[in-house]
Image (tube, coloured by chain):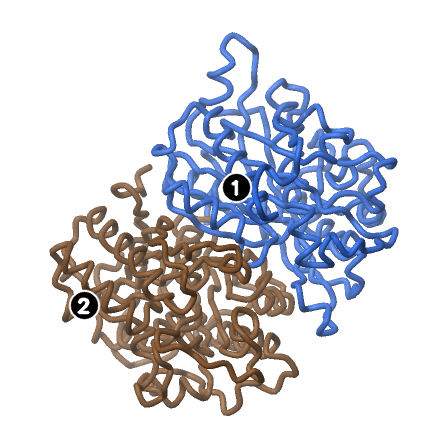
Chain colours: A blue, B brown
Amino acid sequence: MKNKLGKQTFQFPLKPRIIGSCSIVGEKEGKGPMAKWFDIILEDDTFGEKTWEKSESKMLKQALLLALQRSGLEKDQIDSMLTGDLINQLMPSSFMARDLSIPFLGIYGACSTMTESMILGSMMIDGLYASNILIGASSHYCTAERQFRMPLEHGNQRPPSAQWTSTAAGGMVLSANDKGDAAVTQGQDVKEIYITHATPGKIIDAGIKDVNQMGAAMAPAAVDTIVRHLMDTQRAPEFYDLILTGDLGLIGKQIAMDLLNGAGMDVANIYDDCGAMMYFESQDTHGGGSGCGCSASIFSGYVYKEMRSGKIKNALLVSTGALLSTISPQQGESIPGIAHAVAVTTEGGN
Amino acid sequence: MKNKLGKQTFQFPLKPRIIGSCSIVGEKEGKGPMAKWFDIILEDDTFGEKTWEKSESKMLKQALLLALQRSGLEKDQIDSMLTGDLINQLMPSSFMARDLSIPFLGIYGACSTMTESMILGSMMIDGLYASNILIGASSHYCTAERQFRMPLEHGNQRPPSAQWTSTAAGGMVLSANDKGDAAVTQGQDVKEIYITHATPGKIIDAGIKDVNQMGAAMAPAAVDTIVRHLMDTQRAPEFYDLILTGDLGLIGKQIAMDLLNGAGMDVANIYDDCGAMMYFESQDTHGGGSGCGCSASIFSGYVYKEMRSGKIKNALLVSTGALLSTISPQQGESIPGIAHAVAVTTEGGN
């Protein structure tokens, strides 16, 4: 178990690289504060498809194919792909993967899916089972609304604590080798990005039954994973330039801050949440963003580019998932939360 | 990439052991030809719960906890758990995992989930990220019928090619160490069971749109993965005492046999399918069994026990998944098939 650290953390001595990345978002996300970081902003959220599920599937596929192109690799150099989304039976992932003819492993961690794919993908490379892995996650406002709440045509009234499922996808190529974007943008001083540690999370259920309080349901899981990660790696929070939770949104972010403060950690200057970053207040999303694509697109857009340019050196991405189902709230169940953390650095390459 | 073999196969030089196992099935499965191999047969498929989803969740939890007990390990010795099922957002898995407080990674491969969990779990142990991993998969006739077809109360007429989702769950403990059942059943000459190779599959879509022809939809994927596995490992089919597909059922099994024959492989004496094995013809399931729990329970019941006793020495489990969603057929989509193979042996321990 030389690659296990403390109680719950994996370390990757071979430091898998992120060598290609692509983020795609919808119209609304493209008008938010993060717009300049995204690679593609859709002009039309249907993306030319006849159903929302097919739109989401196409968005995820585009993100993966562009990440692949930017990595400088060909499709047949990819050993396996790992993706997931929120939709029943992972329809966007499965139907996208059908066209790519790459060994495929579907994963489900609700909105924690991006870090789940990073953990398993890193393990495949670090364990010498693969040289190059394609990973990604997606969500779409229109697929999620219909599935979890009401069809859009219903004009559902949203309570102030509700979050807005981001129409967004992120794709990345993980590799055993330095290459990709860095090689492509020749002559520029770009940094290599290494994945060094991962902390898969336990399910924490705070007993919250209100499906419009997702942030509150997930915040305790996020804090549990962050604290566990720091204990296992014996790092102080300030080791990181940025600790970024997935989609706690405005309310959940505040709860997470309070809980971290309560645990004696002052993270005010280094902590943020993708859901809280995604929209302007004037965009009227109420609780902020959510969905697998929220942290997937902000990491593979903003964080990735800021790391490539050297502005961020050490980041901890903690995507968060609310593991309710379409029917569990109707059966009186509370919302189980989960969060998986992945540590990424531009320092200390082999 | 020293642990990649050929185009698509992983090898596990440290040979993770299966040290504990448990299979649970419902009433109907408990009256079928495999009944004597299952550890627990429910007298009542509700398992004392108020909803079918909770029944399935309890069944999976019991399978995992009993597998754990039989391994001789305690819960806090388990590093991570990997499970999945067919139900939207993996409700049975997530709600079961909530109670166990073990780092949890949800996976979705439709009925290929059991081998997906074996692949990822083996990698965690072989890559030295974990000592002990808990894996499993479940399905329940009543949750699946309601979700994919009609509520049972509707009394839906089933066409002759339809398969019967097995009410079944299988759980196993994978470990870096020889231990478990073998140690428990002291004095008996039991064999250790090692996982040596895994071949994750590509999605193959044969263009079948009839949701009552799942076996036909999955058979090409199963054959693709078997042929790829044999090529990558340079093994002849007869290397295996048993090649076992997941749930092609009676029709799909025949198609797979024909395709394998067409590829020049005579597997008549060593090939079988869990879906074809699960029920007597008189039980009127039409096409045979299906569901994640079908191959999960037959492997962790029958195959596991026959390997422990030395009757089966080398087996290849190829769980098969139909990656359709609850709405993809309504959107005119065909059924993507997938199959992941795992090679298991009682010979050549370290």
Q: Name the residue located 65 percent from the left edge and 38 percent from the top edge.
A: A45
Residue A148, relative to residue A233: is it above or below?
below
Mark 1 highlights which residue?
A: A11
* SS for callout 2: loop
Question: The residue marked by circle 2 belongs to what chain?
Answer: B
> B118 or B131: nearer the eye?
B118
Q: Is residue A53 visible?
A: yes
Residue B243 in the image: state x and y as whole percent. 24, 65
- Tag nearer the camera, 2 or 1: 2
> A283 or A134: nearer the eye?
A283
Q: Is residue A6 visible?
A: no
**A15 horizontally vs A254: left or right:** left
Q: Name the residue located 38 percent from the left edge and 56 percent from the top edge.
A: B337
Q: Are both tags, 2 and 1, on one chain?
A: no
* SS for callout 1: strand
Residue B343 in the image: state x and y as whole percent. 28, 59
Residue B162, relative to residue A336: is it above or below?
below
Name which residue type carries label 2: Asp
Mark 2 highlights which residue?
A: B241
| Quarter assignment of residue B61 | bottom right
Q: Quadrant of the N terminus of chain B?
A: top left
Residue A63 in the image: state x and y as whole percent. 54, 34
**A105 horizontally vs B241: left or right:** right
Q: Name the residue located 38 percent from the left edge and 46 percent from the top edge.
A: A103
Q: CA distance from mark 2 to mark 1?
A: 38 Å
Q: Name the residue located 46 percent from the left edge and 16 percent from the top edge.
A: A183
Name which residue type carries label 1: Gln
